[in-house]
Image (cartoon, rainbow, N blue to C red):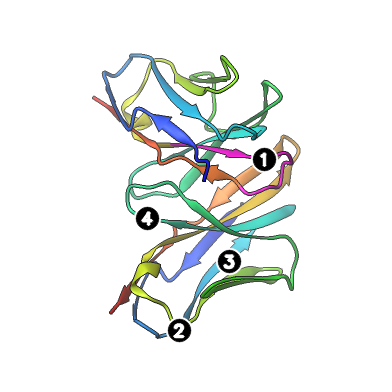
Amino acid sequence: EPEVTQTPSHQVTQMGQEVILRCVPISNHLYFYWYRQILGQKVEFLVSFYNNEISEKSEIFDDQFSVERPDGSNFTLKIRSTKLEDSAMYFCASSGQFRNQPQHFGDGTRLSIL
Amino acid sequence: EDQVTQSPEALRLQEGESSSLNCSYTVSGLRGLFWYRQDPGKGPEFLFTLYSAGEEKEKERLKATLTKKESFLHITAPKPEDSATYLCAVQAVRDTGNQFYFGTGTSLTVIP
């Protein structure tokens, strides 16, 4: 069964550095998402992406964050000038041809900011 | 304020002991309600989508129902492999587009 893959599984970065989290969505999916989950807290929606542009974003997704689909397979989340509170599990998800179709999640990247 | 609340936080069941998990929501503009299963170290795995009050969906030992204020995930005769955290999420329409809100989950342990 096709799956969403995320790399790396664990990223350790110094505070103030930039980090790029990578995702390969399911190949025929058109909608892409990023979520984060701070340890012990709820999964939080960050952003959705469709047709090469952001379609929705939450209040969390400020100028520190950006997303990109640099080629036909990858979907990336860039966090500039990382802060301690950016430490979390980041999940990528994708869904099919229509907006309300089920989202399929990757297994996440654990980001640790030192 | 948009809220999704799940109860109980944790549930221990004997194998074969049926029970229900609750997800209550105070979200306007509900577009859909989703149930996911999450195993340790893994991403959420999609189970069901419910769109309108009165709707029910079933899959093996799981059945999800939806009212205007809450959803239930009924587990019939659970097995140890059903042990996981079950997450509820809602999709809501806002001026800025769709937003997604998750509950904190119910951690289910099924004891052989």
The residue that label 3 is drawn on is: B24
Chain that bears disc 1: A
Q: Is mark 2 on a helix, strand or loop?
A: loop
Which residue appears at 62% of the width and 69% of the height? B70
Give the Cα separation between the discs numbered 3 and 1: 27 Å
Residue at mark 4 = B39
Q: Is A99 situated above or below B8? A: above
Question: Same chain for marks 1 and 2?
Answer: no
Q: How far apart are marks 3 and 2 (CA)?
A: 20 Å
CA distance for labels 3 and 4: 22 Å
Q: Do the dots labelled 3 and 2 sit on one chain?
A: yes
How far apart are labels 1 and 2 at the CA level? 34 Å
x 45%, y 34%: residue = A5
Q: Does the magenta stretch include residue B14?
A: no
Element at label 1:
loop
**Residue A81 visible in the shown view:** yes
Residue pushed farthest bottom?
B17
* Whether residue B28 is visible: no
Q: Label 2 lies in what chain?
A: B
